[in-house]
Amino acid sequence: MTTDQLTKWDPSLTEQVMNVTRPFLKRYFRAEVRGLDHIPPGGALLVSNHSGGLFPMDVPILAAEYYAEHGYDRPLYTLSHDMLMVGPTGEFFRKIGYIKASHQNADAALRSGGLVVVFPGGDYDVYRPTFSENKIDFGGRTGYVKAALNAGVPIVPTVGIGGQETQIFLSRGTWLAKRLGPIAKLARTKIVPISFGFPFGLSLVVPPNIPLPAKIVMKVLPPIDIVAEFGEDPDIDEVDAHVRRVMQRALDELAAERRLPVLG
């Protein structure tokens, strides 16, 4: 690939979708995004923690507020799981900025001057247990640093809180995936997450519970110029540790503001 998915982005359709979803997100999740003024011109890689299990609200909330403030001249792309890009809904998601997660697609989108959202922790992060909901943990994945370096763009750390309160996440279920053996391999998954929510109670991915109306706050942090801060040949692990440290500090600050789960 490469640019063919980028040309699918439809600013007119995206605006229509944002006009519908933003009022709902503002009311139901009392969505708030801070620091949008930190987004630099040109290509940039927005690196975020991922929350909400089967129904993560990070991208819808971030996109709705980004477009409301910056307009529709510059696309916000999201590197997405293969499953989102197939079937009858695949074309719709491509038109509103979702692109298949790959180094080639990330590079093409960043070099085109677009903003690219990546969740390095992926499903490992989005299903983290509730007791560690405010921990930045990418599961050791550092490919995002290489993606930013290859495209010559800054990393923009972004954190969100509240998504892991939309239900009670009990376990990633890595042990269950191992016990399922060939079945888990067929589904190409190393986790079988276990959660508890409304209206079905206990859920192993299915049946899907309805997200509780937890207040979700996201915060965009100042960009990190990797070369300026770490030199022409940076240590990838050192950069990753710095990014996670900056994000953890910001997430701790957001957590300190919250008084009650769900209510915020």
Image (tube, rainbow, N blue to C red):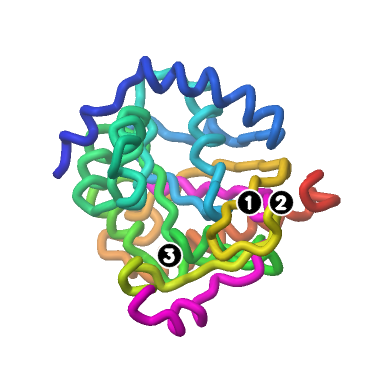
Q: Residue at x 78, y 54 (%)?
A: 256
| Mark 3 lies on residue | 240
**N-terminal of the two: label 1 or label 2?**
2
SS class, disc 3: helix
Classify 71 as above or below 165.
above
Please name the amino acid that badge 2 sits on.
Answer: Phe
Q: Residue 112 appears at what percent x and percent y?
A: 23, 33
- Marks 2 and 3, how far apart at CA: 36 Å
Residue of label 1: 209
Relative to residue 125, is residue 261 drawn left or right?
right
User: Magenta part of the protein: which range?
Assistant: 154-183
Q: CA distance from mark 1 to mark 2?
A: 5 Å
Image location (x, y in percent) of residue 161: 66, 50
Give the crowd class for mark 3: few <14, some 14-19, many >=20 residues within 10 Å: some
Amino acid beneath label 1: Asn
Residue 43 seen = no
Between 116 and 207, the one nearer to me in the picture:
207
Q: Residue furthest right?
A: 259
The three-letter code of the residue at mark 3 reads Asp
Q: Regarding mark 2 in the picture, which secondary structure is present there?
A: loop
Tell me which label, 2 or 3, sits earlier in the chain. 2
Disc 1, disc 2: CB below 8 Å?
yes
Write down the residue under mark 2.
198
